[in-house]
């Protein structure tokens, strides 16, 4: 839920969701304005954000990066909430779905407390409810369900066949090289996720983006992650919020920022279908089935490079034209 807004603006948050530049969520830049971290150093920085501190039974504390006037990136909150939930469940029972709502902006200057409620531990399923709290108020709440793997029916939709391989697709930085004024925060935050739009991203100037009902993005964590299925799922959840809402604008050929739109995630849901590694390439195939009343609905299918359907994501976001 990335709260896709103008990456060059001072505050890209509208409404309850938190903000991070697509492909460059709100992680702190290097000291003294140094070049941003890349590769494994950037990934280690991301892992540090996901490493919660236990402070009481089923209560954890997560740090928020310093991002100046920005709000806390929604993918960070969802990823940290999933870490908290997963730490109260047997590791042999992986997460299969999560549903979260963003109700208030996150404050990056103070920690976030995650309170986990144990709803049920059954023979095959465990259910948790997590509330993220700052300043005594809920900023996000999520339900997550965990399931012991078992045999059953198996089928899937097919991965799009007309997508070029990720190695042949320009990076986001390369795509935006024509528009240095649009790089904004992307040029300053750690590059923990390699993001490669197959078409034009919503960060180009107004008029430079052709309308398309599909938005397809190759992604991978830009270094190596631990083998833990929970960490892999948390990293994928984090990444899944980066570009999804942009598919609503893609339908109309619209962009973020000046002469375009500001937006914020309202909710976020992920269903995990098959085992995966978030540090391997995956295709995020997104589209928007509907937009009305200032809100847009976006759906995304996540495929491994070999065609396996790994996960499905759904999100609704608030979209307002800048200046309105």
Image (spheres, rainbow, N blue to C red):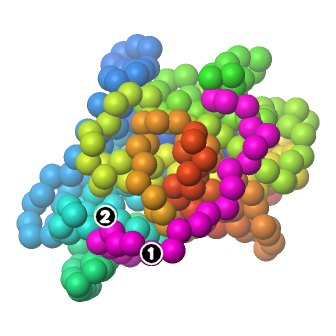
Q: Is residue 118 above or below residue 70?
A: below
Q: Which mark is residue 58?
A: none
Q: Is residue 145 magenta?
A: yes
User: Where, quadrant-wise, is the C terminus in this rendering?
Assistant: bottom right
The residue sitting at 55% across, 22% down in the picture is 187
Q: Nearer the viewer, residue 129 or 13?
A: 129
Please report the bounds of the magenta region as a residue range. 142-166
Place of residue 281 in the rendered image (x, y in percent of width and height, measured from the top left): 53, 36
The residue sitting at 70% across, 67% down in the picture is 297
User: Where, quadrant-wise, is the N terminus in this rendering?
Assistant: bottom right
Q: Which mark is residue 152?
A: 1
The residue sitting at 40% across, 68% down in the picture is 96
Q: Which mark is residue 94?
A: 2
Corner quadrant of residue 260? top right
Dot 1, crowdedness within 10 Å: few (<14), some or many (≥20)? Answer: few
Residue 106 appears in the figure: no
Q: Is residue 90 magenta?
A: no
């Amino acid at each position: 839920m990335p709260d896709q807004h103008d990456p060059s603006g001072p505050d890209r948050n509208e409404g309850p969701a938190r903000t991070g530049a697509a492909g460059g969520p709100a992680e702190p830049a290097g000291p003294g304005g140094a070049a941003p971290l890349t590769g494994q150093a950037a990934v280690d920085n991301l892992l540090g954000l996901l490493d919660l501190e236990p402070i009481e039974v089923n209560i954890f504390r997560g740090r928020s990066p310093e991002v100046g006037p920005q709000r806390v990136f929604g993918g960070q909150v969802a990823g940290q909430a999933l870490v908290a939930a997963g730490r109260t469940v047997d590791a042999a029972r992986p997460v299969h779905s999560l549903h979260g709502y963003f109700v208030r902006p996150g404050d990056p200057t103070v920690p976030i407390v995650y309170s986990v409620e144990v709803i049920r531990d059954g023979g095959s399923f465990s259910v948790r409810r997590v509330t993220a709290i700052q300043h005594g108020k809920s900023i996000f709440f999520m339900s997550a369900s965990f399931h012991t793997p078992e045999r059953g029916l198996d089928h899937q939709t097919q991965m799009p066949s007309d997508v070029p391989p990720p190695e042949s697709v320009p990076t986001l930085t390369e795509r935006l090289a024509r528009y240095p004024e649009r790089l904004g925060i992307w040029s300053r935050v750690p590059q923990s996720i390699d993001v490669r739009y197959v078409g034009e991203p919503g960060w180009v100037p107004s008029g430079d983006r052709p309308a398309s009902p599909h938005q397809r993005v190759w992604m991978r964590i830009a270094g190596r992650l631990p083998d833990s299925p929970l960490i892999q799922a948390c990293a994928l959840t984090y990444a899944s919020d980066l570009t999804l809402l942009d598919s609503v604008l893609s339908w109309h050929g619209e962009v973020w920022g000046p002469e375009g739109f500001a937006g914020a995630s309202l909710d976020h849901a992920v269903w995990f279908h098959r085992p995966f590694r978030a540090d391997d390439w995956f295709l995020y195939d997104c589209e928007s089935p509907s937009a009305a009343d200032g809100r847009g609905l976006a759906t995304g299918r996540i495929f491994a490079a070999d065609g396996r359907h790994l996960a499905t994501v759904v999100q609704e976001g608030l979209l307002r034209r800048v200046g309105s």
